Image (cartoon, rainbow, N blue to C red):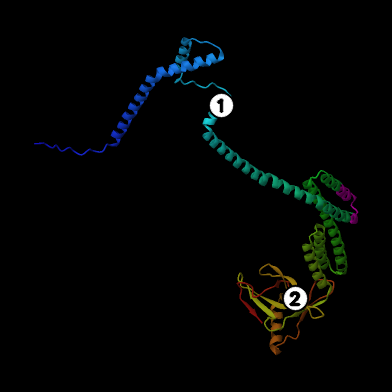
Amino acid sequence: MAIVRLLDPPKSLSLSETLLAMDIADTIRHDDRMREFEMTDGDRRRAAIERLRKAYEAQGDVVSDGVLERAIVKLDEDRFVHKTMGRGPRRLFWTGFVRRGRYSRNVAIAAAACAVVYGGWTVGYDQLVIKPRLEAERRLAIQMEVIPHNLASTVEYAEGVARRLRDDAAIERIDSQRKGVEAALAARDAEEAERGILTIRAVGQELKHREDGVRLVADADAMTSGPISKATDADARAALVDIASQMRDAALRGDLASYSKAADRFKSFAGYILTPYKIQIVDRHGTPAGVEVTHNESGSKAWYQVVEAVSPSGTVYPLEIRDRQTGKTKPVSVWAIRISYDVFIKGKKDKQSDGVIDDNIVGTKPAGTMKINWNFETDGQTLNEWPAPKQAGRNR
């Protein structure tokens, strides 16, 4: 009876077992090649010796087998020996050839970096050096064309004013500055040339300032001499002389605004002084003819007549009146002069009789003077506003 033995199915090899089997197979193949090489080594040597003998015989030489055998043995000894290549161009060439990939990559990277650096340097140099230099040269060329015209016009203006003033020193100074500007132009120094032109212009402005001052002084003298000579009293003359002095000072400084202000004030004062005025009581609706003021400090009372200065043509002239209560002076057309109680009552009764003040002229100011001739006794105290602040007042 036959016994059948069941065998387990073969298992697949693992990775480590597979690698081990491949290593064993490679070792067996290597041993087989070595064994084959050793078996044929004798035939290879005999064939090599025969070829060498024939080569020498072809040249007419006879070499013994021993020498040829030793040459073959020496050849086999050096076959698998590595010999380092000597230094020199040959080694350098072949080293470069072997490493051509790496060297090519490094050269490409270096070339790209050089190109970037060169491009950046070129653009930066163009933007930061070349263009500013060209712009500066363009501006200089324009200045070299414009400056001579500016110089000519500035010198002409300054010298014209200097000649009108007959100022030889100023003319010499202008000529010296002009020569300096011309030298700077010859040296293409635009900045120095412009500084010279500014100096000449400043001289011209200074001379014009003096010329205007001389003209204004002459105008002031012509304007003020007549009215001052026509003033008939010392106070009026002193007031006009004081304003005329202010005009001359402003003219010498070349201060046109101050001169005009003083001139207007002089005209106003002179017109008032040289014109006769009547001082009349104000008698119209909304304006009291008289004011009674009680002083808070002492409780005493004072009485004032409200008046205005009227010219022969009927024009009311505003006077600069100082307020007794506040101490401030301001120009007003209607103001109040202090009177006695009797005068206050008299005017009140005149107003109550028919509603109109018949005797309304209380003073006169003759032509040529500032002095007012009053028709009543007064201490000259005045008000330019009423009722005074923080005081009880009674009007009529």
Which one is in front, 310 or 363? 310
**In the image, is 22 to the left or to the right of 91?**
left
**In the image, is 202 to the left or to the right of 385?**
right
Query: For mark 1, what is the residue?
Result: 92
Which one is in front, 337 or 275? 275
Q: Position of residue 87 (x, y in %)?
A: 55, 22
Q: Earlier in the sequence, mark 2 or mark 1?
A: 1
Which one is in front, 278 or 163? 163
Q: Position of residue 306 (x, y in %)?
A: 71, 78
Query: For mark 2, what is the residue?
Result: 377
Residue placed at 82% from the left, 45% from the top? Answer: 184
Alpha carbon of mark 2 to alpha carbon of mark 1: how far?
A: 134 Å
Residue 92 image-quadrant placement? top right
Q: Position of residue 81 (x, y in %)?
A: 45, 20
Q: Amino acid at mark 1?
A: Leu
Residue placed at 62% from the left, 72% from the top? Answer: 389
Residue 245 in view of the camera: yes
Quadrant position of the C terminus in the picture: bottom right
What's the magenta region?
A: 163-175
Q: Amino acid at mark 2?
A: Glu
